[in-house]
Amino acid sequence: MPNLKAIRVRIASVKSTRQITSAMKMVSAAKLRKAQDKIVRLRPYANKLHDILVNLSQSLAESQVENIYAREGTPEKVLIVMITSNRGLCGAFNSNVVKEARNLVAEEYFDQYRKGNVRFLTIGKNGFDNMRKHKFPIAAEYNDLLNDLTFERTVTIAEKVMQSFTTGEYDRVELIYNHFKNAAVQQLTREVFLPVQSVQEDVKAPVNADYIYEPGKEEIIRELIPKSLKIQFYKAILDSFVAENGARMTAMHKATDNATTMISELTLQYNKARQASITNQILEVVSGAEALKG
């Protein structure tokens, strides 16, 4: 027969856990609503700017104007930007990003990795800890960014990444992150950040448009392309941040429901054990009374 005290202790423990998961669910829901408003407002602007960037890059290539953010040929030196979270308890949110990054190295950049030409830039402590544990080369880590995510702080990182590309330190920069679709669905996404893809390479890009350039193509390279790249970089990190809170809210919701189910099962088990204990006590009293009569 199960020990009544052990069952009571377990019920109290599960109830305490349920309070924690329920509170975490509400906190994540509040953060999600706030961050979701930002990404919903940013996406139309960022997507349109990206379309212009892709078309502009193609136009510059055809006109032979040098675009320092475009580079042809097989990449020899690769930087992989991993965007994860600082904390766990969000399901497979982080493990999916880590798995995709490792698969990318194994399937596409294995030769470069053997030569020591693949490095990682981690945004989020979870990804940083995992890659460090498995001794992957880390170029830089910006885990504190997620504690106060702003466009101004993100631009600083984007500028360093862009400079490392234009100076030839890297031939390709790729982003791996979770794209937010809704609170229950996060889509693992891999994007080529640099070099800027042409219309032929970017299947999502629209047909090349005939733009009128004012003041000129050289000025646009200096102003519009860097601005667009910074917006794309910020959008990826903000997307991941919103997806993280959605994943955590969903995970905590499931954990709370599971705790409630477990409490019901333990309560039923406790009542059965208590009933059996009372029955045994009655039988003992009756048996004792019968023995005295005899």
Image (cartoon, helix red, strand yellow):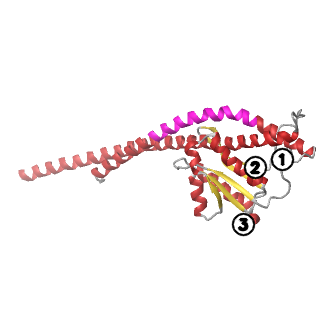
Q: Is disc 3 surrounded by few (<14), some (14 to 19) or many (20+) residues within 10 Å? A: some
At 54% from the left and 41% from the top, the residue drawn is 250
Circle nearer the viewer, 1 or 2: 2
Distance in Å between CA atoms under marks 1 and 2:
10 Å
- The residue type indicated by label 3 comes to Gly
Q: Residue furthest right?
A: 63
Residue type beneath disc 1? Glu
| Local SS, label 2 | strand
Q: Which residue corresponds to mark 2?
A: 192
19 horizontally vs 114: left or right? left
Q: Which mark is residue 245?
A: none
The magenta segment is: 23-47
Determine whether 156 is above or below 80 in the image.
above
Measured as percent of width and height from the top left, residue 16 is found at: 37, 44
Query: Main SS of the magenta segment?
Result: helix
Dot 3: element: loop
Q: Is residue 104 visible?
A: yes
Mark 2 to mark 3 CA distance (whole Å): 20 Å
**In the image, is residue 43 part of the stretch drawn in magenta?**
yes
Q: Are marks 1 and 2 in contact (CB under 8 Å)?
A: yes
Q: Nearer the viewer, residue 45 or 202?
A: 45
Image quarter hosting the N terminus: bottom left
Q: At label 2, which amino acid type do we have?
A: Val
Of badges 1 and 3, the one in the foreground is: 3
**Residue topped by disc 3:** 116
Q: Which residue is mark 1?
A: 201
In the foreground, 147 or 131? 147
- Looking at the image, tell me whether mark 2 or mark 3 is earlier in sequence order: 3
At numbered mark 1, what does the secondary structure look like: helix, strand or loop? loop
